[in-house]
Amino acid sequence: MPVYNPPLRDMQFVMHEVLKVTEELQPMAKYADADIDTINAVLEEGAKFATEVVFPLNISGDEEGCKLDIKTHAVTTPKGFKEAYAKYVEGGWPALSGDPAFGGQGLPLVINQCFYEMLNSANQAWTMYPGLTHGAHAALHSHGQRVMHADANRDDLEVIGREAPAKQLTATEIFARVAAAAHHTGGFGR
């Protein structure tokens, strides 16, 4: 039976003994509270999530794959993927390095990248789902300000932000809803 053991000690060695990330990060105001204990605790919990929730779906996900209903165009993910994503959201993992102004935890990106290394190693197929959402978030964070400050209905955008994790919206659905809210209020193209 396959086993996945996250390389926590290797990650900790590189971050703490080679790169000395806390010494590099703490002088920055937004990472002043970053310490070795916090980083290690997050990585340890991330390792548990990768091994206990995501890894067990690796083989079954490959065997089942996604199914497309040609008539309705609905796509069904392998058994357990949706529930694992719900646990991912419930655990606050999507917000790990996100901007606290938008509900993120504000942890350094290096921690997020270590977590994603574990997720990718545990189950590449499943990890593509939150990876797409992170891409949508990055695009909205970088370019969404223009939309929000161009008279887009902030209530619409806040509803989209609340619904995305709860309804497990895809990146395409998030973009479509933001674009519709901006178009409705004349927010794009100014």
Image (cartoon, helix red, strand yellow):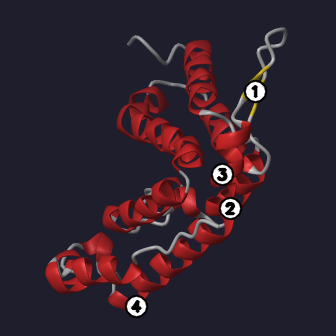
The residue under label 4 is 37
Q: Which quarter of the image is occupied by the N terminus?
A: bottom right
Residue 21 at x, y percent in the picture: 22, 77
Q: What is the secondary structure assignment of the residue under circle 3?
A: helix
Mark drawn on residue 59: 3
Residue drawn at x 61%, y 64% as measured from the top left: 92
Query: Mark 1 vs mark 4: which is more N-terminal?
Result: 4
The residue under label 2 is 56
CB under 8 Å between callouts 1 and 2? no
Residue 49 at x, y percent in the picture: 61, 69
Q: What is the secondary structure assignment of the residue under circle 2?
A: helix
The residue under label 1 is 67
Q: From the viewer's perspective, is the residue at label 1 or at label 4 nearer?
A: 1
Question: What amino acid is found at the position of numbered circle 3 in the picture?
Answer: Ile
Query: Mark 2 vs mark 4: which is more N-terminal?
Result: 4
Q: Pick out the residue farthest to the right.
A: 71
Q: From the viewer's perspective, is the residue at label 3 or at label 2 nearer?
A: 3
Give me the C-alpha separation between circle 2 and circle 4. Answer: 28 Å
Question: What amino acid is found at the position of numbered circle 4 in the picture?
Answer: Asp
Q: Is the residue marked by circle 1 packed among few (<14), some (14-19), or many (20+) residues within 10 Å?
A: few
Q: Within the image, what quadrant is residue 50 found in?
A: bottom right
Q: Within the image, what quadrant is residue 152 found in?
A: top right
